[in-house]
Amino acid sequence: MPQVIGKLSQLPSANGCSPKLRAFAKDQIRGITVINGNLGQLSAKIRAFVEESVAMCLPERIHIVDGSEEESTTLLATLQHLGTIEPLPKYENCWLARTNPADVARVESKTFICTKHPEQAIPIPKDGVKGTLGNWISPEDYERAVQSRFPGCMKGRTMYVVPFSMGPIASPLSKFGIEITDSAYVVCSMRIMTRMGQEVLEKLADNSDFIKCLHSVGTPASGKINMPSWPCDPERTIILHKPANNEIVSYGSGYGGNSLLGKKCFALRIGSTIAQREGWLAEHMLILGITDPNGVKKYIAAAFPSACGKTNLAMMNPTLPGYLMECVGDDIAWMKFDSNGQLRAINPENGFFGVAPGTSSQTNPNAMKTVYKNTIFTNVASTSDGGIFWEGMENEIDPDVEITDWLGQPWKLGESKTPAAHPNSRFCAPASQCPIIDPSWEDNEGVPISAILFGGRRPEGVPLVYEANSWAHGVFIGSAMRSETTAAAEHKGKMILHDPFAMRPFFGYNFGDYLKHWLGMEKLAAKVGGHMPKIFHVNWFRKDANGKFLWPGFGENTRVLEWILQRVDEKDCYQESAIGRIPAPGAMNFEGLRGSVDEKELFSIPKQFWLDEVEAIEQYYNNQLPQDLPLSIAQELADLKRRVMQM
Ligand code: OXD
Ligand code: MN
């Protein structure tokens, strides 16, 4: 058993731990080979983080990542040699990774926020009810979790030191991180998903702070790795966040949100805690630029739960003539007021880590055009002509090719009973390659946000679009969001789950306090002479009595966005309803769709459905937030109930 030299929580700064511990860490690092970069170039804080991590994880060598093309080529070759990835010769610099089948999705049940008191991290649920708004871990258990997993976990491996920026490097809205990882797959993916390497290191040379991200794919307690091409330790996987130290620790999984720590862990969980402290918003939202036929451009941000079509909407091709849509981001928005009181957003990411199945030239041609170079695919199927395949691409492959499924087994279209690609298989592609990337997507000051959309998969009762009556009503709508479950996390089967703000798996602090923060943004806006954007709820997924979608979605969503932008301009094109403002009869452009969509049904608000919905929301609040629900949100629910009863 390697010697345990100290506590991770003693790592916050170069002076953060005992002299004995530091001396040990320094000795340890002296004997280690640095195969890329130079320890001397690291700031004192980064060096301390590296030294302590080396002393605990005992890697064989250190590689300080510079982010260069050459480095990426070498790492991809190493991964190919290990059997982690294989080339896809049909495309340019594209690769396919197959994971251990036990490591295929985010693990919400093993994801924790560490604070001194539980109520700082999560709302305390009603007695006897299981909380669903995050998991809390005490500082003592956090330490035990680290000490029982990390010591010696990188033996024989390379420890990569990955300096990265969430957001354009020069933007005042961006934040920096250092991810320490023993996975070259993570390094190559982080190069796509973040701005990574030397430039960030130089920015941090003044010894400024950064988010500490420690990741290991782990080594099972038995020491036996059953799939050497994808080492992991699924039984002991754990994802930990300590907001007070700006620290993330992830063990046991190499997959997506568990290992690319800039994404969900930093940009959302730790990000939301920083945003609360600093007065801004870190949200699970796409950002889309819309130019209307008069050339007027506006941006919207939209929150939908995982795998509900955020990437499709972010890259949509409009069907209404004269419109132009441009993509700023497909998953995360950091939004802050500028000095003129305008809410502005950046996409903190640099790439798309999109769900592959269902993406096709029909559903998202721009995503398809994005992924055919410089992309790492994970757990999709491959074709004998060196290409990729997943459910939804049936019309895009040569009928003569042979298909190999994500598990490496032969697979036959129309015959095989299992999916060819894992339902949560992904493409990881540079955002700059998107044909409709917005010219301002890397603007340091961000883009101005005119409207915020919430939505989800609601097969019943929820109209195509409605507008909140006020900011507080909009915050209530966000808090009451529900959606049919998907494959992005570890849930089985279809259920309508509450997913407030599409953030349920991503809150970094008590959801009750998050609501207070959102409500408080209105005052903050007033202070800087601004105002809040309007809030809307959309639902592309309503079905008729035969289970058929009522709305064609995709490019036709332009019609909904057109109405939304008219409302942003305060056009009188709405009517009041019990649940909010809906388009006035004839106000939404159905030209060309008449006869094929049931306008009446799309906007119907069934009284019994909404009475049940009110009850479900009430029960949810009572169960999950009995002590933490802000009064004004309770009031919004009471007002909705009264209005629905009067229908
Ligand atoms: C994602 C998710 O990967 O939301 O973006 O799960
Ligand atoms: Mn997401």
Image: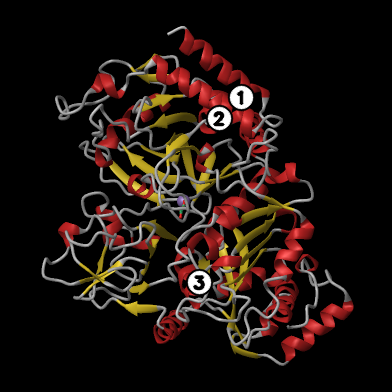
Number of residues whose C-alpha sits closer than 10 Å to that of mark 3, classed few (under 14), some (14–19) or many (20 or more) = many
Which residue does the image show at 49% across and 20% down from the upper left?
A: 469
Left or right of 615 in this view: 428: left
What residue is shown at x 83% (from left), y 69% (from top)? 16
Under tag 2, what secondary structure?
A: helix
User: Tag 1: Cα neighbours inside 10 Å, few (<14), some, or many (≥20)?
Assistant: many
Q: Foreground mark, 1 or 2? A: 1
Height in image: 367 above or below 473?
below
Circle 1: element type: helix
What whole-number distance in Å separates the C-alpha atoms at marks 2 and 3? 36 Å
Q: Residue 345 appears at what percent x and percent y?
A: 51, 46
Q: Which residue is mark 1?
A: 633
Residue with the mark numbered 2: 475
- The residue where tag 3 is placed is 186
The single residue placed furthest to the top in the displayed view is 646
How many numbered callouts? 3
Spot occupied by residue 25 in the image (x, y as percentages of width and height): 78, 82
Describe residue 82's horizontal placement relative to residue 277 as left or right. Answer: left
Looking at the image, the residue that sits furthest to the left is 400
User: Does label 1 or label 2 sit earlier along the sequence?
Assistant: 2
Nearest the eye: 428 or 420: 420
At label 2, which amino acid type do we have?
A: Val
Mark with earlier residue (3, 1) = 3
Q: Quadrant of residue 457?
A: top left
